[in-house]
Image (cartoon, helix red, strand yellow):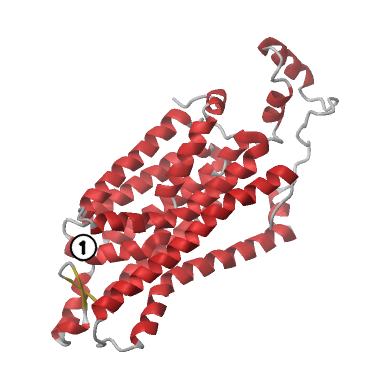
Amino acid sequence: MAPSLALAYRRRWWMAVSAIFENLFFSAVLLGWGSLLIMLKSEGFYSHLCTENLTGAPNESFIYYNGWPSCIEQEEVLNLGFTIGSFLLSAATMPLGLLMDRFGPRPVRLVGSSCFAASCAVMAAAAYNPRVFSILIFLAVCLNGFGGICLTFTSLTLPNMFGNIRSTILSLMIGSYASSAVTFPGVKLIYDLGASFRVIMWVWTGLACMVILNCLLNWPGESFPAPEDLRYTSVQMFCSLSTLHLLKRASSLKGSCSHPRLICPSPASVPLCRSVCSPIFLWSVVTMAITQLRVIFFMGAMNKMLEFLVIHGDPHRKNSHLRESKRHCGAEVLRFCFCRSGSYQTPQGGSVPNAHGCTLR
């Protein structure tokens, strides 16, 4: 049974802290695709695509990961999975907003955490026989991207419970979402220390199940009221009164806007079509889409750009193993610096609107 909104309000700090860690480990982890790509190659996913190339080319022209051959065809297929998963990570926001307005964040978060757990389980199961089950990687990354954006989107409603510091809490949520790109590099460090890929994914599945349990126990069935909401305003105005007096006063003020501090809903709300077609909304959609597409295309093409700069289009260049390692190492350093800068700047960016009541753009 879902807890009440009052009980969720008393647990808001636990929910906020847990949501930050859940965003860090379960949201946009696909942005760390470079590290996952190396692990998938090391497990032999789609390595059978290199078999025909190996018969007509010398072995030293190919890179081997744990005895599995790697080639351009394999990397292109795996990068296609990243493209699909990252697309769902961005494109699912519109239907998720409609679903959250209709059903609230609780069922959306349950579905998202279940999808993420299923994605880790699918990766672990496919690793037992990668030659046969390589196709399941596409299903896994789709579930991973959809589940991650569900967790991120629902956590963005939590700051409504924090009043004057909601911008700071919101910035922490966004910062943890952006910093989740370092999760797969961290997992790869554990993998390089000798941990099995299957064990890592099964453990990650269990942790995702803990997210489901946390949502069942703490997230309410109704949406969190915003500070301008009538429910939130009534609680803030009469918090020092007794419960009985609060109920009497609220019932006497129902439908009346005579109280100077009470915010009543407007009888004629703005239509959705008018809000969507407003210039500020359309301009925000354009700028956000360009920014998001820039990040996705940059992440997908960065490995190829660095590879071309190193080998200059010559696949038979010597010391390819060393150069490949340096290339991926440099990519992870760039990704780490990018994500760390976002996580360090977001709390400061949220504290300014809290203090001055302004909007940063």
Q: Is residue 287 left or right of residue 262?
A: left
Residue 286 picture location, percent across and down: 63, 65
Residue in front for this viewpoint, 332 or 87: 332
Determine the image quadrant of residue 62. bottom left
Q: Nearer the viewer, residue 323 or 66?
A: 323
Quadrant the C terminus occupies: bottom right
Q: Is residue 232 above or below residue 39?
A: above
Q: Is residue 45 visible?
A: no
Give the vertical position of 358 relative to 136 (above or below): above
User: Would you say residue 50 is visible in this rendering?
Assistant: yes
Q: Residue at x 53, y 46 (%)?
A: 173
User: Against 44, is 127 above or below?
Assistant: above
For this rendering, which residue is in front, 361 or 212?
A: 361
- Residue 80, horizontal then vertical, whole percent: 36, 69
Instruction: Name the residue at 49% across, 32% down.
Output: 14
Foreground pick, 289 / 172: 172
The image quarter in which residue 82 lies: bottom left
Mark 1: amino acid: Glu
On-image quarter of the N terminus = top left
User: Measured along the vertical axis of the image, is residue 69 above or below residue 345?
Assistant: below
Q: Which residue is mark 1?
A: 43
Question: Residue 52 location, x and y as percent?
Answer: 17, 81
